[in-house]
Amino acid sequence: MDSRSLVMHQAMLADRVRLRAYDRALAHAVRPGDTVLDVGAGLLALGMMALRHGAAHVYAVEGDPVTAAVAARIADDNGLSGKLTVLHGDARTVELPTRVDVIVAELMGNIGPEEEMPEILAAVARRSLAPGGRVVPQRLTTTLTAIEFDGEGWGLWSGDALGYRLDAVQEYSEPAAHLHFFQREPRALSAPVPIGDSNLGASAHGVTAAARKLRITRPGTLHAVMGSFTATLAPGVTLSNFPSYPGCNWGVWIWPLRHTAVEAGDVLRARVLVPENVRVATDWRLECGISRRGAS
């Protein structure tokens, strides 16, 4: 297992809020004797949770061959060979001996559908989910918000940062997404506006290509547009990457803009352009423009 994969799994397994939320959701979804399919199983945290909540058998499907081999060793080391089967392959095409009662996955990218969770789970559910089966998470909502940074991130590249003019940097940024972990929470200049809202397992809809209107609700300096998500794992159980929580292993994506003074009532029209077959949001582009309050 390479160091990047190892660090990623370390961060996810150390994210106690995330794991507690999935544990609560699986306690709600899994019934004694259920068969569970863990999509993108990694190192089996969710599959082993499902067993703890009464699953009779878990099929853990992992696409990376090295991770799948490590997962199989973990299953053997924990005496789970009769209850948990590790399969290397694509969950959309893997052959299971039976339909399953529950599908669980943690395929949220830092902007929600970045890892194609809506598309993947819709395909897996059509092929493998029994009638009346449950999917965890149940829903994934992705939003855009106009923000002003609090003296960090893209907000540093201004005309009065650290006593110097640093705004020349604004001339050299591409309109592509940047991954950001906030040190201080930004000021939201608009309400969050959904660009994707999927019932997982049923809807294959990720991010809409249609433009959205972000209505400015407070005056300030527009620095960027932020993409974030909320996943509803089960009734009353949600995870979101904004506002983030201590130990959260998700960042947000921001699209940096030329710093622009805005007033309440201005409208930012924004559209995310997702190239076909491109999952990583660093290649997603943002088109936007401002309509001023009172302008004809």
Image (tube, helix red, strand yellow):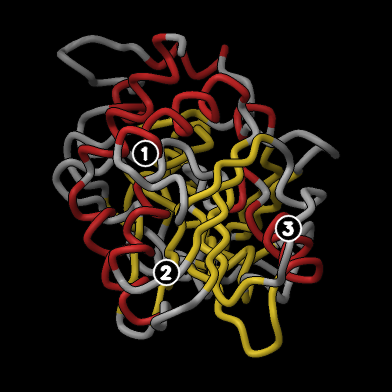
Q: Residue at x 71, y 68 (%)?
A: 98
Q: Amino acid type of disc 3?
A: Leu
Q: From the image, tell me which residue sits under label 3.
A: 96
| Residues at circles 2 and 3 in contact by the CB criterion of under 8 Å | no
Q: x%, y% of residue 182?
A: 25, 37
Q: Amino acid type of disc 2?
A: Ala
| Mark 2 or mark 3: whose residue is earlier in sequence | 3
| Mark 3 or mark 1: whose residue is earlier in sequence | 3
Label 3 crowding class (10 Å Cα cut-off): few <14, some 14-19, many 20+? few
Badge 2 marks a residue whose secondary structure is loop
Residue reaching furthest to the right: 276
Label 1 crowding class (10 Å Cα cut-off): few <14, some 14-19, many 20+? some
Looking at the rendered structure, which numbered label has been put on residue 251?
1
Label 2 crowding class (10 Å Cα cut-off): few <14, some 14-19, many 20+? some
| Mark 1 or mark 2: whose residue is earlier in sequence | 2
Q: From the image, tell me which residue sits under label 2.
A: 191
Looking at the rendered structure, which numbered label has been put on residue 87?
none
Q: x%, y% of residue 58?
A: 50, 58
